């Protein structure tokens, strides 16, 4: 599972870089499953730096019959 990646957005007409986003993922293994634990997006634009993040906790797998 990827832990991080970067995406760049370019203006097709001018070739200018519009923004860059770096995505970071963290996973938690529960049994045989890798479940998302944290997701963070850092975005850099001409107007500033923005960070959005959420965390998931208390994962539980459903019990099968």
Image (tube, rainbow, N blue to C red):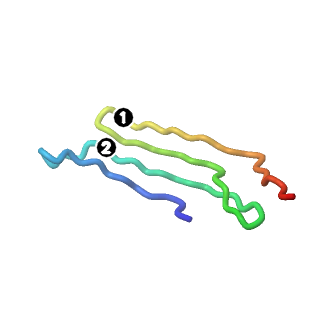
Q: Which residue lies at the image location 49% right of the left edge and 58% below the top edge? A: 4
Where is residue 26 drawn, in percent x and y? 61, 55
**Secondary structure found at label 1:** strand
Q: Residue furthest front?
A: 65
Q: Which residue lies at the image location 36% right of the left edge and 34% below the top edge? A: 48
Q: Which residue lies at the image location 56% right of the left edge and 54% below the top edge? A: 25
Nearest to the observer: residue 52 or residue 64? 64
Which residue, given by chain and number where applicable, does mark 1 sit on?
A: 48
Q: Which quadrant is home to the C terminus?
A: bottom right
Q: Residue furthest right?
A: 65
Q: Which mark is residue 8?
A: none
Q: CA distance from mark 1 to mark 2?
A: 10 Å
**Does residue 51 appear left or right of residue 56 in this picture?**
left
Where is residue 9 drawn, in percent x and y? 29, 48
- Mark 1, mark 2: which one is toward the viewer? 2
Nearest to the observer: residue 2 or residue 51? 2
**Does residue 63 appear left or right of residue 45 in this picture?**
right
Which residue, given by chain and number where applicable, does mark 2 sit on?
A: 19
Q: Is residue 33 above or below residue 17?
A: below
Q: Which quadrant is home to the N terminus?
A: bottom right
């Amino acid at each position: 599972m990827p832990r991080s990646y970067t995406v760049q957005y370019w203006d097709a007409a001018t070739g200018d870089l519009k923004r860059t986003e770096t995505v970071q993922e963290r996973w938690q293994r529960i049994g045989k499953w890798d479940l998302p634990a944290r997701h963070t997006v850092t975005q850099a634009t001409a107007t500033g730096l923005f960070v959005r993040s959420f965390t998931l906790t208390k994962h539980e797998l459903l019990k099968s019959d």
